[in-house]
Image (cartoon, rainbow, N blue to C red):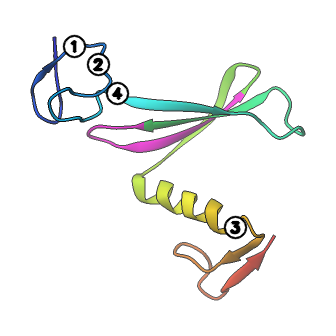
Amino acid sequence: MAACAACGSETEARFRFCPWCGATQRRKVVEFFWPHPNSPGRALRVSRYFGDEPQVRFSVWDDGVACAAVSLDEDEARRLAEFLEQTESGVRPHCAGSDPKSTTESF
């Protein structure tokens, strides 16, 4: 049996969460995103890693082969999520990491 990284209790390998403390037992979760029609044969794979070095990794796939990848730390991943949320209207409000001289940017 494996030990839960959070509480140290023994858990069966098939468990996704510790039955004692509820902590996730998965090392990562993965989601694939289909491309825009102008990028046939490609896909984006996003993996969120847990544990000692949490990160969000983006991999660009072309015809089933990973061509490029980049990892973001938790703060940058959160900033990316905020950027996507805030730009649905087509106007980008000023946020950390953007040009401090500009308060909005149109697309």
How many C-alpha atoms fall within 10 Å of the one at disc 4: few (<14), some, or many (≥20)? some
The amino acid type found where label 1 is placed reads Glu
As drawn, the label of residue 12 is: 1
Residue at 51%, 40% (x, y): give it.
57
Question: Of label 3 and label 1, which has the lower sequence position?
Answer: 1
Mark before the other along the chain sequence, 4 or 3: 4
Question: Label 2's element?
Answer: loop
Query: Dot 1 surroundings within 10 Å: few (below 14), some, or many (20 or more)?
Result: some
User: Residue at horizontal 18%, vertical 31%?
Assistant: 5
- The label nearer to you, 4 versus 1, is 1
Q: Quadrant of residue 10?
A: top left
Prevailing secondary structure of the magenta residues: strand
Secondary structure at badge 4 equals loop
Query: Which residue lies under the disc numbered 4?
Result: 26
Q: Earlier in the sequence, mark 4 or mark 1?
A: 1
Check residue 15 in the rendering and tell me which mark sits there, or answer none. 2
Q: Work out which quarter of the rendered image holds the N terminus and state it.
A: top left
In depth, the one of 10 and 19 nearer the eye is 19
Q: Are marks 3 and 1 in contact (CB under 8 Å)?
A: no
Amino acid bearing label 2: Phe
Q: CA distance from mark 1 to mark 2?
A: 6 Å
Q: Which residue is mark 3?
A: 87
Three-letter code for the amino acid on which mark 4 is drawn: Arg
Which amino acid type is marked by label 3? Thr
| Cα distance in 3D space between marks 4 and 1 | 12 Å
Q: Distance from label 4 to label 2 (Cα)?
A: 9 Å
Q: Earlier in the sequence, mark 4 or mark 2?
A: 2
The residue stretch that appears in magenta: 49-61
Whether residues under marks 4 and 3 lie with C-beta atoms below 8 angstroms apart, the answer is no
